[in-house]
Amino acid sequence: MERVNHFVPEGVEDIHCNAYEIKENTITNIKRIFKSFGYRQILTPTFEYYDLFSDIEGTIHRDEMFKFIDGNGKILVLRPDVTTPIARMVANNYPSCRGHLKFSYATNIFRIHDEQNGKKREFTQAGIEYLGNDQPDSDAEVVALAIKGLKNCGIEDFQIDLGQAGYFKGLIKESRLPVEKQKKMRGFIEEKNFAALKIFLNDLNIDDFFKNALLEIPYLFGKPEETIEEAERFICNEEMKIALENIRDVYSVLKDYGYEKYLSIDFGMIHHIEYYTGVIFKGYVNHYGKTVLSGGRYDQLTKQYGYYMPATGFGLNIDALLEVFSMYKMNKDFACSTDYLVLYEKDYRKNGLKLAEQLREKGFIVESNLFEKNIKKHIVNANDRNIKEIVQICGEDVKRIDLRNNKVYKNTVTQFFKGLNNLEIFASIH
């Protein structure tokens, strides 16, 4: 029998201290941005009833969910998505809300993926949901937050592709294609498989106008003004007209944010088309082959739980963002560190612990330990743990060993604290 106790399951990983610190700092940074726009943090359960997700069309596929049975025989799933539980939460707890709701989250998602495709089965996602507002400004705010989040993480070489679910839905409705043929065609368009799409459409008994329009849609991407103008050629009903005006309005608001350089339009973006109802978008970082964020408008979701509220939002894959950091060698020199190691003998333990706590109150990261008569042992350990300075209690005095420049100083405790005012805090916890 193969020994597995030294390994972790496929699709999950250990995160070591330096990488975890970078991840936590990234999440904190993102959450701070969300909060500055008035989004209030919530947390949904790690597992939910399978029925919550099973009837939602166009979102997480049933085969991607981790399922298990509780003691009452009910099927549960590990959280495969955050938006759906938030819709459930809103419908159950905010039925009397007359205004808008703004929620944010940062939590782990669990999905079953093909073991050969390299995707993680557990990953961290941070995102927002804006409910109760159906105006273009709310869509633009969500996209703007996605852009600001990437920028504040130090990423500039990225692009946000905007699409409009209603534009394609309007065209399909007018063409009167059977549902099964619609699904097959959507796959070709989303993959931009132009050859297969052309063969498929040639075999359909539909008007040439719709054939040409459906052949052109995968090519309808690029600079926003030009692409929107091109898309006007295929408008054949009110639904498409409204959709086009909507994406034009959203783009106009985003220009007022000053974010137009990050934007492109892609009318061939039709993923989860049944789930989304309006503007949809994906975020890409140059030279990174996967999406780092995605989102859009989903006005009908809460209605499925008994309470209608228009809604829009997005999710940012934190683990994908960390892969981007690694690819661009961002934070490559980062290492967890400690400012001071306070050493004391048994007779001076009280003084040592008091000094350590006083330093922590000033915002320093401080470790303390019993002095074992061999300073070399402590120095080796300090170097391994990236400790900047050793402070050894010597009665009423302190001996400082600065490991950055290999110098030794002797001060009174008062002199030591006076000197702190002129020192840089190397690893503040604040």
Image: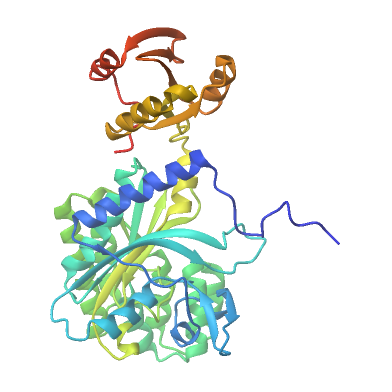
Determine the residue positioned at 14% across, 54% down: 256
| Vertical relation: 50 (above or below) 398 | below
Left or right of residue 82: residue 98: left
Q: Quadrant of residue 238?
A: bottom left
Residue 89, percent from left and from top: 32, 79
Q: Is residue 16 visible?
A: yes
Q: Which colouring convention does the figure follow?
A: rainbow
| Vertical relation: 318 (above or below) 277 | above
Residue nearer the viewer, 18 or 306: 18
Residue 121, percent from left and from top: 57, 63
Residue 49, percent from left and from top: 48, 83
Left or right of residue 411: residue 246: left
| Vertical relation: 64 (above or below) 304 | above
Report the quarter where the N terminus lies.
bottom right
Q: Quadrant of residue 92?
A: bottom left
Residue nearer the viewer, 85 or 412: 412
Q: Quadrant of residue 341?
A: top left
Left or right of residue 251: residue 72: right
Determine the residue positioned at 37% across, 29% down: 356
Determine the residue positioned at 20% across, 72% down: 101
Residue nearer the viewer, 132 or 73: 73
Q: Which residue is at the far front?
A: 347
Residue 98, percent from left and from top: 13, 81
Report the quarter where the C terminus lies.
top left
